[in-house]
Image (spheres, rainbow, N blue to C red):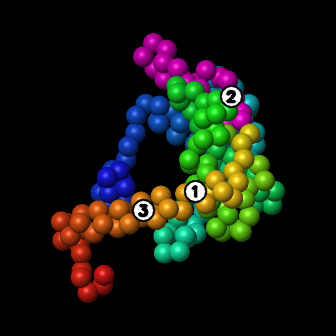
Amino acid sequence: MRYVSTYIYGERFQNEEMDKGRELAEILEKDEKVDDSDIESVRIMLPTLKEREYEIETSLGDVPLYGKFDGFDEKNFVLDEIKSGKNGWDQRKVDNCEQITFYSLMIYQKFKKLPKKIRLHYAPTERVAGTIRFTGEVESFVTERSLNDVLGLLVPIKRTWEGIQKVSLKEYKSLGKYDHQSA
């Protein structure tokens, strides 16, 4: 249903934590010094990524795959993901992060090899006087994905795509946007 809400109806899901993460992403994209000392500490502590907001499109048979990585170095095959928020990250959580496995699958599908290095950088936030702010710290974790890890996503991705197609068709019909001749 989130797919339908986002990609058919154009709704955006957000909260204060997500807004703070977007603010950090925009600052990192510009890579300019800022007046907010907490954000500036995070900006300085995060590694400089070769290419930010790396977009990738590929497919898994008839299933289109799209992703936007926080950073990817095509030459050295290094994948970087940046997370922020109050829900902490540890090595176990990073090692089990399905998003990273999915990104690794997309890289494998597009380039026929897995990332050589995968890093997740976590910038914690906290609520102070009713406002979300960065703590000024950054924790970095290194993880890896095997071919077996990414292949484990094949069946769930195909099932999810089938569900998306069914729900999307139903929603488009309800909006009067379904043309049975073009289907």
Residue range highlighted in magenta: 121-141
* Element on which disc 2 rests: loop
Mark 3 belongs to which amino acid? Answer: Arg
Q: CA distance from mark 3 to mark 1?
A: 13 Å
Q: Are marks 1 and 2 in contact (CB under 8 Å)?
A: no
Task: State the CA–CA distance, disc 3 to disc 2.
Answer: 36 Å
Q: Earlier in the sequence, mark 3 or mark 2?
A: 2
Q: In terms of secondary structure, what is the magenta stretch mainly?
A: strand
Q: Is residue 125 left or right of residue 13?
A: right
Q: Would you name the residue on which mark 3 appears?
A: 159
Q: Identify which residue is drawn at 26% across, 87% down.
A: 181
| 32 to 51, vertically: above or below | above
- Crowd tier of the residue under label 2, counting other residues whose Cα lies within 10 Å: few below 14, some 14–19, many 20 or above: some
Q: Which mark is residue 183?
A: none
| Residue found at the far bottom of this picture | 181
Mark 1: amino acid: Gly
* Residue indicated by mark 2: 138
Q: Nearer the viewer, mark 3 or mark 2?
A: 3
Q: Residue at x 40, y 34 (%)?
A: 15
Which residue lies at the image location 68% right of the left edge and 28% below the top edge? 138
**Residue type indicated by callout 2:** Val
Q: Identify the image quadrant of residue 106.
A: bottom right
Disc 1 or 2, which lies upstream in sequence? 2
The residues bearing labels 1 and 2 have C-alpha atoms spaced at a distance of 31 Å
Residue matched to label 1: 152
Residue 154 image position (x, y, % from top left): 54, 62
Q: Is residue 16 left or right of residue 50?
A: left
Q: Is residue 82 above or below residue 128?
A: below
Residue at image coords 52%, 25%: 86
Secondary structure found at label 1: loop
